[in-house]
Image: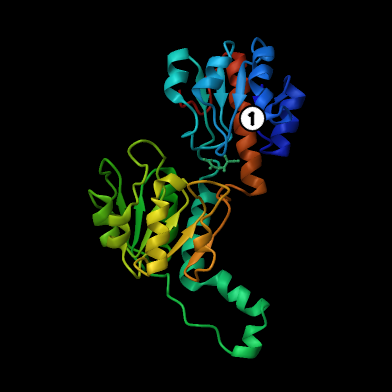
Amino acid sequence: VLLVAPMNAYLEQELDRRCRLFRLWETPPDRRADFLRANAASIRAVVPYAALGVDAAMIDALPALEIVASFSVGIDRVDLARCRERGIRVTNTPDVLTDDVADLAVGLAIATLRKIPQADRYVRAGLWKNKGDFTLTTRFSGKRVGIIGLGRIGLAVAKRVEAFDCPVNYYQRTKQAYPNYTYYPSVVELAANSDVLVVACPLNEHTRHIVNREVMEALGPKGVLINIGRGPHVDEAALVAALVDGRLGGAGLDVFEDEPNAPEALFALDNVVLVPHVGSATHETRAAMADLLLGNLEAHVAGKPLLTQVV
Ligand code: 8YV
């Protein structure tokens, strides 16, 4: 098994215990092609994650590769077409992280509207004592929440915000039969009819920059964008400009176009909450993701059906 980066200590320990583990990061980048060539005959599985995937060059360098088991639900950085061509199986880690990611989406929405991190900084800086009460903020309960992508995570967000009396709107390519949720056939119409817009769809060629300038204009100067999907879902340059100009009300962002670089222009803004891609980052969920990944590898080796097969 080739692990592309150190992503989880428990996963690494279990892989080490159960198989011969190659740690790609221990070889300097300029010597990795040689390393792969030298070990190509032994590497039957690759474990990538959201930050570092498996591209066609790596797949082509590994003739014995049978399975790519990603430590993530999103597999936008795995070359699925090449895997299909080569008959390589692909698994991901759905379901086990849904609750955490949905929790973070709601947390970001509340933190952004109620300015929780800013209020915390206010207390720590001694400003409460010196300058008096903190500024008034904006209510979250009852706001219209628009969700792009009503899949597992989108539905979990919908269920949570219903408890805050938020009407739920959604966009996806095909309308579903959800009696309590209102469908909009375009993201612009969804944004125009929502106060908080949550990106919860997978990243692919249809959803890259699905939140563009027009969508931000439709969301408007009081609207808030929450992104717990992938950075490239949003035109980040347009987002920064809209936030700086006050054409968009605020943003709560877990993901960025060029991680780990978040746009520095956002650092000085009071209407954004920025977190470093932590949607699934709890002890409980990361352990469950590791167990699911290990289960997929074991099923593959045992010739049993894979637990969460994508390809
Ligand atoms: C992680 C994620 O960042 O599951 C995904 O798609 O983006 C996250 O769970 C990750 O891959 C774990 O390191």
The residue positioned 26% from the left and 40% from the top of the image is 174
What secondary structure is marked by label 1? loop
Q: Is residue 190 left or right of residue 38?
A: left
- Residue 169 relative to residue 99: left or right: left
Dot 1, crowdedness within 10 Å: few (<14), some or many (≥20)?
some
Display colour scheme: rainbow
Q: Quadrant of the N terminus?
A: top right
**One can see residue 263 in this view:** yes
* Residue lying at the far front of the rendered structure: 30
Q: Residue at x 35, y 42 (%)?
A: 207
Q: Is residue 193 visible?
A: no
**Where is residue 110 drawn, in percent x and y?**
48, 67
Q: Residue at x 34, y 65 (%)?
A: 195
Nearer to the camera, 266 or 281: 266
* Residue 2 found in image quarter: top right
Q: Quadrant of ligand 1?
A: top right
Q: Position of residue 205 (x, y in %)?
A: 35, 36
Q: In the image, residue 160 lies at what x, y percent?
A: 45, 58
Q: How many marks?
A: 1
Report the residue at 55% width, 46% height from top: 259
Q: Is 37 placed left or right of 80 in the picture?
A: right
Does 252 appear above or below 140?
Answer: above
The quarter of the picture where residue 247 lies is: bottom left
Residue identified by numbered label 1: 4
Q: Nearer the viewer, residue 190 or 268?
A: 268
The foreground one among 101 and 217 is 217
Mark 1 belongs to which amino acid?
Val
Q: Position of residue 236 (x, y in %)?
A: 42, 53
In the displayed structure, 11 sits above or below 41; it is: below
Within 8 Å of ligand 1, the CB of disc 1? no
